[in-house]
Image: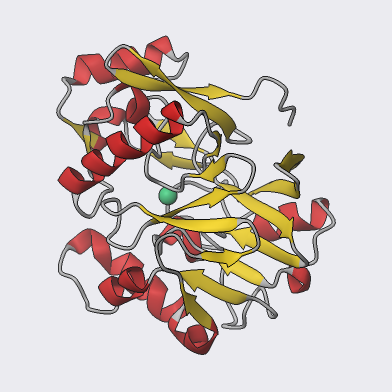
Amino acid sequence: MFHRFSLGEMAATIVSDGPLTLDAAPKIFSGPPAEALDAAMVAAGLPTDRVRVEQNCLVVDTGGRRALFDNGLGSRKLYGRQSGKLLESLAEAGIDPASIDALVLTHAHTDHCWGTMSDAGTPNFPNAQIYLAQAELDFWTSNPPGQKRERSIEGVKRHLLPLRDRIHFVRDGEEFLPGVQAWTTPGHTPGHLAYLFAGGWCLTGDVAFHHPISYVFPEAESAYDVDPVLGAATRRRALDRLAADKLQVVGYHQPWPGIGRVEREGGGFRFVAASDAPC
Ligand SMILES: [Zn+2]
């Protein structure tokens, strides 16, 4: 599944790796009562028993470079059977993986970088340089304790360390590709980066991964954040900026194809999907 659009002056395509099925919202978020979380799901027209999130990978052509932002879960079915579609979606869109010369990561969780290597241990994007924050690689290679972290540690060993000589560490504010700037947004993971694009666009990664809960309750702490307190503070700060600056947003886990903007609502926010985005 793919969706073509113009991101500022860049030709862009969202390619799907397929949706993930997660636990019900009250098992992920703490702070607001379970009834309030369920009510927000119902108000958004969503079921309360499970959370389903998309994986919207972005491809942009900029200044002679072709960049893919995040690359899905690969062949592993950790969150339901519908993921692992990225290569298929790229083929549907007519994008040759060998034409990708920049593989840009928001962070190194399973669902963002496990499409880097094939099951045979060869790079799926053979000509790509890899971009991420040094704090991200440093964290996952320091063997941080915690049961839920084992998969990410294993994934970094399998998908990123064999390509260590292709990694360029991106610094906050660095324009590492023409018209693309990194924005340090720690909390979900220590080295999480969002990306700002010329023309008033932002790719948010997992700063606010859940529609609608991350927006209605930005202060709710998420079980998926490595540092839930910092994650909530960063989410509030980032959503404030996205709303105030009226940026167009590409959200990795937002409803397909993940394009929209953020508005203030009540004490929180809402994600407003772009109305003209057909599948
Ligand atoms: Zn994610």
Q: Which residue sits at x=42%, y=61%?
A: 110
Residue 153 vertical placement versus 95 (above, below): below
Does residue 269 appear in the picture of this structure?
A: yes
Image position of 10 with respect to 254: above or below: below
Q: Is 62 drawn above or below residue 162 in the view shown?
A: above
Between 59 and 155, the one nearer to me in the picture:
59
Residue 11 is left or right of residue 191, and the answer is: right
Residue 52 in the image: state x and y as whole percent.
Answer: 46, 34
**Left or right of 249, for residue 5:** right
Q: Residue furthest right?
A: 94
- Relative to 149, residue 78 above or below: above
Q: At x 72% / y 64%, what residue is drawn?
A: 66
Which of the two residues, 87 or 240, is positioned nearer the viewer here?
240
Q: Nearer the viewer, residue 206 or 42?
A: 206
Residue 178: x and y in percent read 65, 62
Q: Answer whether residue 118 is visible to the viewer in this image.
A: no
- Residue 251 located left or right of residue 240: right
Q: How is the image coloured?
A: secondary structure
Query: Residue 64, image x and y in percent?
Result: 78, 67
Q: Position of residue 196 (x, y in %)?
A: 52, 49
Count of numbered tags: 0
| Rendered residue at 35%/31% (across/down) | 240
Residue at 27% x, 68% y: name it. Answer: 150
| Residue 88 shown left or right of residue 266 in the figure | right
* Quadrant of image for the N terminus: top right
Give the quarter of the figure containing the C terminus: top right
Tell me where residue 116 sits by quadrant. bottom right
